[in-house]
Amino acid sequence: MKNLILILLLLYRFSVNAQANDTEAALYNIGFGAVFSTVGAIINKPPKEALGKVIKKSLWQGALGGYITFESKRILREGRRNEQWEYFWMAKLVNAAGTSIKENAALNNNFYDKWHLNFGFNRIELETKDNFKIKYKLLPVALVYSIGVALQTNFEFEKTLKTGEFIFSRNTERFIETNSRGIAFPGSIVLFSPEKNDFGLLSHEIIHLYQSNDFSIFNTYLNKPIKKWSTGNKTIDWLDKNFNTEFHYIIQRLVYYSQYRPIESNAYFDNFLEHEAGYYSDTLH
């Protein structure tokens, strides 16, 4: 509980100032990666490893991952401005690289030891530390949400292929009632059907998925206890090998609702996560 409170306090400190320009946006992403990667590296370091060495290594690796994450968001913004789908996949791959580097740093590994790419509820991992090895893991929270969404909406196959994200659409009064046009769930996006071709709307919701990738760094904080529990326990070991922890959604939701503003209010974009999504998608108003 103490660790969770500390995380929330640090996140609040990072989110009190909105990103008003690319310099502030870059500093936020670099700082986020450096600080939370270092916290993770300290948690995951072996008892006999020197603390100073761990901090030095994780700071620069986390900062590097944060900067690459920032560039992925800028690439997505260019895709929105040019209305060209090629940018969307490029942004996704760059974002996956930045997220992988931050997770490696938080695990106290070399930044190139493991790479991963999320597609809906699927996580593809490429291990490079010893031998090249490809692994598949299920994202359980994203899977549950994707099933729920799929049962109630229309699957946008073409947009899913073009963006690398699970995209659905639905024409329902609920969007009108809530004055919204789209919503990002774990692993998927639902768009208001009449506006599903709006590049700004789509980019806004994809940034929310990228924010989930940012927060996934907190899953590494559970690495030690999970490894400990899986030793000698075949069930937990199997779960660890086939499912990826998604503890980070709890923290992300707490941060989001701590700054919640009604969508119809003039202060809606005072919510840091909404402001960031609006900033990179040119949907601030």
Image (spheres, rainbow, N blue to C red):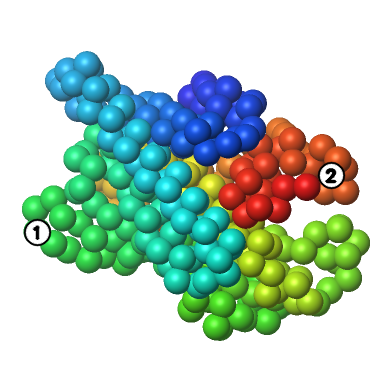
Please identify the quarter of the rendering in which residue 38 is found: top left
Determine whether the residue tagged by mark 1 lies in a helix, strand or loop.
loop
Q: Which residue is mark 1?
A: 131
Please tell me the numbered disc located at residue 148. none
Q: Is residue 12 visible?
A: yes
Instruction: Identify whether 185 is placed above or below 35.
Output: below
Q: Which amino acid type corresponds to the residue marked 1 in the rendered image?
A: Asn
Instruction: Identify whether 280 is placed above or below 84.
Output: above
Residue at (68% x, 75% y) in the render: 197
Tell me if mark 2 has few (under 14), some (14-19) or many (20+) residues whose alpha carbon lies within 10 angstroms of its own.
few
Residue at (62% x, 35% y) in the render: 20
Horizontally, is 199 left or right of 74 in the view?
right
Q: Which amino acid type corresponds to the residue marked 2 in the rendered image?
A: Pro
Residue at (48% x, 24% y) in the render: 3
Residue at (31% x, 27% y) in the render: 59
Between 184 and 107, which is closer to the camera in this rendering? 184
Which numbered disc flags the more N-terminal residue, 1 or 2?
A: 1
Q: Which residue is mark 2?
A: 262
Q: Position of residue 48 (x, y in %)?
A: 14, 20
Instruction: Identify whether 67 is placed above or below 49.
Output: below
